[in-house]
Image (cartoon, helix red, strand yellow):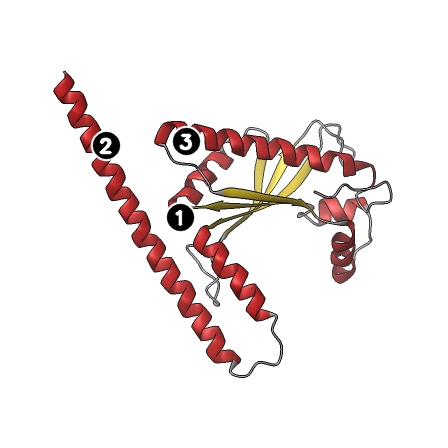
Amino acid sequence: MNSVNSNSIYGEYAEYLDKILEDLSRRFKNYDDYVLERTGEHGFEHITTRIKSDESMREKCIRKGIPETPYSALYVNTDAIGMRIITSFVDDIYQMMDYIRSFDNSTIIEEKDYIKHAKPNGYRSYHLILGIKTDYPDVNGNEKGIYYVEIQLRTIAMDTWASLEHKIRYKKNIADQELISSELKRCADELASCELTMQTIRGMIRSKLLQESNSTTSNDN
């Protein structure tokens, strides 16, 4: 993770960003441990994190026509801290959202469900902006300040598709763009259908294991 120096657009608040990210990452690790102990399966596959680089944040401010200040970087923009959580199944995403909603020190500022309502190109993911109350001062003069975290939740299949689509989209001067877009959309839909089937199979296996466990317990009694 890139450390931010004293000349950073984040100013005196730069030192708090890593701490907030580390604390949130720890909470998700605790969640994963809990799910693993309860079900024998991980709550998610992996998490990637980042503090938006000084250069990227300055470029964003310029694009939006706003001053390159800590206030712009940490309050007007809400993606200085970012996390992407990759799960195995769609159900895992909604279970994790239930966990996030239970946080006592945060509020969901914005959320977009691109899983139930996929983008026209087939993109699927769950996006949210989390406002976290911390023990650190913020740009609004609060002693216990609010910092924003951008979180994306995707399954392995969604993340793979998005990564490949991103690479293809940046290829220039390719003929038949409409056909390519149509094929990408078809792939996204097929992956989504396959994911639901795999999730159903997992449910069947869990149900079967539960029946066997109950049967063994009953016989022991």
Place of residue 131 in the rendered image (x, y in percent of width and height, measured from the top left): 62, 39
Three-letter amino acid code at the position of disc 2: Leu
> Residue 144 appears at what percent x and percent y?
71, 28
The three-letter amino acid code for the residue at tag 1 is Val
User: What crowding class fits label 2: few (fewer than 14 Cα within 10 Å), some (14-19), or many (20 or more)?
Assistant: few
Residue 114 shows in the view: no
Taking depth in this image into account, of 218 and 126 the one nearest to the observer is 218
Whether residue 203 is visible, yes or no, is yes
Q: CA distance from mark 3 to mark 1?
A: 17 Å
Residue mark closest to the camera, 1 vs 2: 2
Q: Say which residue label 3 marks.
A: 36
How would you rate the neighbour count of disc 3 (Cα within 10 Å): few for under 14, some for 14-19, many for 20 or more? some
Q: Is residue 216 above or below residue 132?
A: above
Assign a secondary structure to mark 2: helix
Q: Quadrant of the N terminus?
A: top right
Which of the two marks, 3 or 1, is nearer to us in this view?
3
Q: CA distance from mark 3 to mark 2?
A: 16 Å
Q: Mark 3 or 2 closer to N-term?
A: 3
The quarter of the rendered structure image containing the C terminus is top left
Q: Going by the image, does 177 lie left or right of 78? A: left
Hey, which residue is sitting farthest right in the picture?
7
Q: Residue at x 51, y 36 (%)?
A: 100
Q: Are the residues tagged 3 and 1 within 8 Å (C-beta)?
A: no
Residue 15 picture location, percent across and down? 77, 35
CB-based contact (under 8 Å), mark 1 and mark 2: no
Q: Residues within 10 Å of mark 1 (few under 14, many from 20)?
A: many
* Tag 1 residue: 90
The residue lying at 82 percent from left, 54 percent from top is 67
State the residue at coordinates (74%, 49%).
Answer: 53
Tell me the SS state at disc 1.
Answer: helix
Determine which residue is flagged by label 2.
210
Residue 56 drawn at (x, y percent): 74, 55
